[in-house]
Amino acid sequence: MLNVSEDILSLTDFKRRTTELLDRMRATRRPLVLTLNGKAECVVQSAEAYQQLVDEAEKNNAIERIRQGLESMRAGQGRPASEVFAALEERYPYLRRK
């Protein structure tokens, strides 16, 4: 979680103290918000934290797509999987099961 009093600093300060701040970021596992002319410009975080964020976003996206699919099926939309596979096998004969 971001600590507003410690994790928001100027880009200039980050340039001066890069190694120290990267070490602190790794130790605390908190991102840094860098400002330019007093406004938030970018967020710096570890590659591991970024990967966790990406993984969580992908997971949430998949869950939402599944939820939407289930909702559409409950509403009577969609087709049974057997119909979909039959249509695919008709269109692409090399997919036919033997």
Image (tube, rainbow, N blue to C red):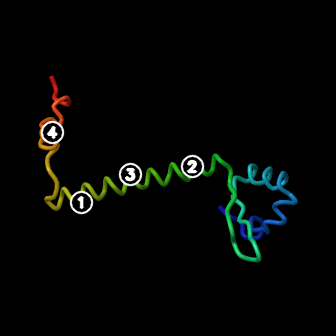
Q: Amino acid at mark 4?
A: Arg
Q: Secondary structure at mark 4?
A: helix
Q: Amino acid at mark 2?
A: Gln
The residue under the point 16% across, 26% down is 97
Inter-mark Cα distance, 3 to 4: 28 Å
Image quadrant of residue 7? Answer: bottom right
Q: Secondary structure at mark 3?
A: helix
Q: Give the labeled residue for mark 3.
A: 62
**x and y percentages locating residue 87 in the rendered image:** 13, 41
Residue density around tag 4, few if under 14, some if 14–19, many if 20 or more, within 10 Å? few
> Disc 3 or 2, which lies upstream in sequence?
2
Q: Amino acid at mark 3?
A: Ala
Q: Secondary structure at mark 2?
A: helix
Inter-mark Cα distance, 3 to 2: 15 Å
Q: Nearer the viewer, mark 3 or mark 4?
A: 4
Q: Give the labeled residue for mark 4.
A: 91
User: What residue occupies the far bottom of the structure in this picture?
Assistant: 38
The residue under the point 19% across, 29% down is 94
